[in-house]
C-alpha cells in the first residue's frame, strides 16, 4: 500500500514500513488502499458509462435529452417517494447532493486514514532512534539463515538500542542539573525523552487519532451524504431481519427527480423529469461495505489502544515480559540476576525500550525478540561491570 501512496504522492516507496502494529496498518495501509480502489471504480463508471438517465417529455429531441441529463447530473436531484406529490418551486426537497463527488470524498477519506501514520512517522523520528530501522533489522534477523549474518544483525540492533537508551540517561542527567524554563519543563514531568516514555505516549496519542478519524468519518459522512450514515449498517440489518427491501431507502436512491427551466421565445418553461442513477448501485454497495469496514477498524483499534494502555500502565507487566524472555535463554541463573531485572527494565530500558521490543515481537517472532532482549541484557551487564570496576579503581588509595 505504501507503494501505491508513494506513486500517488510522487514519492516512490521501496519497501513498506512496519514500525507499528496490525490495527494501525488496518487504517493507514488497507483502508487507504480500499478507498483509492473504490474511487477508481466509481470514477470509471462516471466517465466511461452513463451515470444518469432522465425520462424526458416526448417532444424533446436528442439534444434536449442530452441537455437534461447533463443539467441534472451537474445540479443535484432530489428523492421523492411515488406516493408523494411533486413539490412546487421553493418547497423543501430531499436533495441528493453527493453522487458527483463520491470519487473525491473517497480520496479525502483515504488521505484522512493515512494522516495519523504521517504524524507517527514524523514525530517518532525525532525521538533519537529509528524505530523502523530496528524493526526491519529484526525482520532481517528472522529471515537470515547464516549464523554469521544473524550475529551481525543482532549486534547492529543492540548497538542502535544501546545508543538511544544511553542518550536517555545522559539527557535525564542534564535536565536534572539544568532546571530552567519552568513552563517548558512542566509538560515533561510525566512524559518525554528524559522520562523514557516519549515513544509510548506518542504511540498512544496516534492510536487515539486513528480512532477519532474513523468515528469522525462516520459522522462527517452524514453531512456529505445528506443522510444518517452512522446508522446505515444498523438500518440495513434491521431491514434484513424484518424481511424488508433494504435498498428501498432515501440514502442511495436509484430513481430521483430533477427540476430545470428552459427559456422558449421569452417564456420560461419549468420541467420536472424522473431520472435513474445507475451510479448509486455502486455507491450503495461501496458505502455499505465502508460502514462495516470502518466499524471493524474502530473496534480493532479501540481494543489495541486498551491493550497498549494496560501494558504501559502496569510496571509488573513490563517486568514479567522481560523476565519471560530472559528465562527462555536461561539468563537468570541465580537470585542476584533476578534482582537485577527491575533495574534493567526501569533504569535502562524504561518504557520506550520495552515498547520497541514489543514492536519487534509484533512484527517478527518470539525467537527474534528473545535474542534481542538477551543481547541487551548482556550488553547492560557488561557496562555495569565495567562501571563497577572503574569505581573500585577510583576508590582505591
Image (cartoon, rainbow, N blue to C red):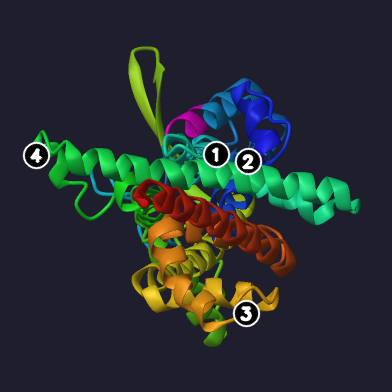
Residue at 58% x, 42% y is 160
Query: Which element type, helix, strand or loop, lies under badge 4?
Result: helix
Q: Which residue was labeled with disc 3? A: 333
Residue 327 is one of the magenta-drawn residues: no
Residue indicated by mark 1: 130
Relative placement, left or right, of 226 versus 159 is left
Mark 2 / mark 3, whichever is N-terminal: 2
Tell me, yes or no, if residue 184 can be seen here. Answer: yes
> Residue farthest to the left?
182
Measured Cα–Cα span from mark 2 to mark 4: 34 Å
Q: Which residue is mark 4?
A: 183
| Magenta stretch, overall SS | helix
Query: What is the C-alpha distance between the residues marked 2 and 3?
Result: 32 Å
Q: Furthest residue to the bottom?
A: 242
Q: Along the line of sight, which residue is nearer the eye, 235 or 308?
A: 308
Q: Measure how far apart labels 2 and 1 are at the Cα level.
A: 5 Å
Please tell me whether residue 207 is drawn above or below residue 327 in the rendered image.
above
Please say whether residue 207 is visible from this viewpoint.
Answer: no
Q: Earlier in the sequence, mark 1 or mark 3?
A: 1
- Say whether marks 2 and 1 touch (CB < 8 Å): yes
Say whether marks 2 and 3 touch (CB < 8 Å): no
Q: Earlier in the sequence, mark 2 or mark 4?
A: 2
Around disc 3, counting alpha carbons within 10 Å, would you say few (fewer than 14), some (14 to 19), or many (20 or more)?
few
Of label 1 and label 4, which has the lower sequence position?
A: 1
Q: Earlier in the sequence, mark 3 or mark 4?
A: 4
- Above or below residue 268? Residue 377 is below
Q: Nearer the viewer, residue 1 or 341?
A: 341
Instruction: Based on the picture, tell me whether residue 72 belongs to the magenta stretch.
Output: yes
User: Tags 3 and 4 in contact by the CB under 8 Å rule?
Assistant: no
Cα–Cα span, label 3 and label 4 = 47 Å
Q: Secondary structure at mark 2?
A: helix
Point out the stretch of residues depicted in magenta. 71-75
Amino acid at each position: 500500500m505504501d507503494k501505491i501512496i508513494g506513486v500517488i504522492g510522487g514519492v516512490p516507496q521501496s519497501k513498506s514500513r512496519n514500525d507499528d502494529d496490525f490495527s494501525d496498518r488496518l487504517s493507514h495501509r488497507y483502508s487507504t488502499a480500499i478507498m483509492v480502489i473504490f474511487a477508481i471504480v466509481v470514477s470509471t463508471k462516471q466517465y466511461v458509462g452513463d451515470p444518469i438517465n432522465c425520462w424526458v417529455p416526448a417532444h424533446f429531441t436528442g439534444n434536449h435529452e442530452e441537455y437534461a441529463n447533463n443539467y441534472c447530473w451537474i445540479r443535484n436531484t432530489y428523492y421523492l417517494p411515488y406516493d408523494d406529490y411533486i413539490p412546487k418551486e421553493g418547497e423543501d426537497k430531499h436533495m441528493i447532493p453527493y453522487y458527483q463527488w463520491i470519487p473525491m470524498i473517497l480520496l479525502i477519506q483515504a488521505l484522512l486514514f493515512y494522516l495519523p501514520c504521517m504524524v507517527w512517522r514524523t514525530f517518532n523520528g525525532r525521538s533519537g532512534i529509528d524505530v523502523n530501522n530496528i524493526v526491519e533489522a529484526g525482520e532481517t534477523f528472522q529471515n537470515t539463515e547464516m549464523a554469521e549474518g544473524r550475529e551481525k544483525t543482532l549486534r547492529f540492533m543492540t548497538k542502535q538500542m544501546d545508543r538511544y537508551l544511553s542518550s536517555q540517561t545522559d539527557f535525564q542527567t542534564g535536565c536534572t542539573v539544568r532546571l530552567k524554563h519552568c513552563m517548558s519543563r512542566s509538560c515533561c514531568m510525566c512524559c518525554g525523552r528524559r522520562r523514557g516514555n516519549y515513544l509510548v505516549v506518542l504511540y498512544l496519542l496516534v492510536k487515539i487519532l486513528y480512532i477519532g478519524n474513523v468515528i469522525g468519518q462516520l459522522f462527517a459522512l452524514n453531512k456529505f451524504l445528506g443522510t444518517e450514515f452512522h446508522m446505515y449498517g444498523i438500518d440495513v440489518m434491521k431491514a434484513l431481519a424484518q424481511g424488508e427491501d433494504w435498498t428501498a431507502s432515501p440514502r442511495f436512491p436509484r430513481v430521483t427527480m430533477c427540476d430545470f427551466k428552459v427559456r422558449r421565445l421569452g417564456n420560461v418553461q419549468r420541467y420536472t423529469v424522473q431520472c435513474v442513477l445507475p451510479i448509486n448501485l455502486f455507491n450503495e454497495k461501496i458505502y455499505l461495505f465502508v460502514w462495516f469496514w470502518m466499524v471493524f477498524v474502530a473496534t480493532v483499534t479501540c481494543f489495541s489502544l486498551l491493550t497498549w494502555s494496560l501494558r504501559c500502565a502496569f510496571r509488573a507487566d513490563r517486568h514479567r515480559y522481560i523476565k519471560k524472555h530472559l528465562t527462555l535463554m536461561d539468563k537468570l541463573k541465580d537470585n542476584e540476576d533476578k534482582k537485577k531485572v527491575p533495574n534493567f527494565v526501569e533504569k535502562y530500558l524504561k518504557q520506550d525500550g520495552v515498547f520497541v521490543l514489543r514492536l519487534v515481537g509484533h512484527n517478527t517472532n518470539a525467537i527474534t525478540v528473545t535474542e534481542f532482549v538477551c543481547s541487551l541484557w548482556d550488553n547492560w551487564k557488561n557496562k555495569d561491570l565495567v562501571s563497577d570496576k572503574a569505581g573500585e579503581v577510583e576508590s582505591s588509595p
